Amino acid sequence: MNSIQASISYLKGTSYEIGRLQGEEIKKNPNAMNVILSSESIDETKYKDTKQLIDQYAPGLNEELQGFADSLNIKPSCLNFFDETLLQPGGCSLGAVLPSKTSDGKTYVLRNYDLSPAISDMRLCTTKVKGKYSHTGFSVSYFGRSEGLNEEGFCVAFASCGIPVGKHPGMKKPILKGLQFMVIVRALLENCKDVEEGITYLENMPIGTNMNLLLSDAKGNVALVETYDGEKVVERGNKKSGFLIATNHAVMPKIMKLEDRKLEQSEIRYNFLKNNLESNDFFTKHKLQQLMFNEYPNGVTVHNFEENFGTVHSILFNLNDKQLDISFGSPINNKIYKLKVGETLPFNELEVFIENSNYGPNFWKLIK
């Protein structure tokens, strides 16, 4: 079994102050700095367009990026974040379980994020930007977020829908100009207090990524927003079924017509969650957590790290208590840490244990 390092950041202040704080942090990690910085500035037109979109839909983030750049004495256009070069295909399993299905009458969200530790930030952030909702979640490309829970009990979690959009080999080229998931997730967490506000916030937002975006709140509301090549469909969960889930394929008929293929392993993970959550049982928090201790193909936790598809973090969100139960890396091989939104852990780094499993060539099999 191998191990790698993960990190924890506590970010508080104005957007610019948080940017400078992260600039000082990154100076201590030359390897991370090499990934975040580009060898040359990106195209000026693309830089200006991206900056304008961020200003409109994620206000304050440009000031953070400027503070970071000032700390390193570079131009913001030298940050890879603007060119989205860090966007990588990721597998995810998501599930919101509503009060009608839980023994304590609370709302929970299960979330596994599957990637390679080599291309994941492996960094948990508690972020308190002055004038915005504070939130706790994992970073993507250092400044974006893959999921999180904010101080109002609003939870956002991302999964790619079909072949991820990006500029890397094997990825789909973007069909339209729009924001990528890591900016969208962070913008929602910092600017919205519940599911309805989140849906409204997304209404006119230009979205360049294909995603399953799960929105949940402490009032027991849940919605899945599915986007594909500019199409967007919203499905609200209902109390009768008591849950709403997603993995890495389309589940809504309109989107399924656009993406008619899916990875068989995505369907296997989806069916594992569906078959377990469809039971008539009321779920305790412990029983929900145990679902994440099952390894693929008999569960949703994946150890295919050598092929860039292993669980790099796992979270059970308790939206009513605003608590996160987190594992860095697979929850099967690593400790679970508990913290409240807005808090941080009593250390800045920790060792994460990685054990690879090879699931054979069918792991990448496409089906209709």
Image (cartoon, grey):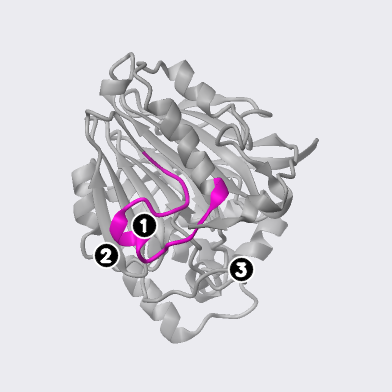
Q: Which residue is mark 2?
A: 205
- In primary-sequence order, the first of circles 3 and 1 is 3
Secondary element under disc 3, as helix, strand or loop, is: loop
Mark sitting earlier along the chain (2/3) = 3
User: Crowding at label 2, few (<14), some or many (≥20) Cα neighbours within 10 Å?
Assistant: some
Q: Identify the residue shown where x is 74% and y is 45%.
A: 358
Query: What amino acid is found at the position of numbered circle 2 in the picture?
Result: Met
Q: Secondary structure at mark 2?
A: loop
Structural crowding at the residue carrying mark 3, measured as other residues with C-alpha within 10 Å and reported as few (<14), some (14–19) or many (≥20)? some
Percent across and percent down for residue 156 are 36, 44
The answer to which quarter of the image holds residue 196 is top left
Check the image and report above or below for 131 versus 183.
Answer: above
Q: Which of the 4 image quadrants contains residue 32?
A: bottom right
Q: Nearer the viewer, mark 3 or mark 1?
A: 1
Which quadrant holds residue 128? top left
Which label is found at residue 184?
1
User: Quick check: can you spot residue 58?
Assistant: no
Instruction: Please state which amino acid type lies under the numbered disc 1.
Output: Ile
Task: Report x, y in % for residue 179.
Answer: 38, 66
Question: Which residue, given by chain and number where applicable, does mark 3 sit on?
Answer: 37
Residue 363 in view of the camera: yes
User: Is 59 positioned to the left or the right of 294 in the image?
Assistant: left
Tell whether position 134 is magenta.
no
The range drawn in magenta is: 245-265
Question: What's under tag 3, amino acid-wise?
Answer: Leu
Mark 2 or 3: the one toward you: 2
Distance, label 2 to label 3, CA atoms, is: 27 Å
Give how far apart the Cα atoms at labels 3 and 1 are. 22 Å
Q: Is residue 246 magenta?
A: yes
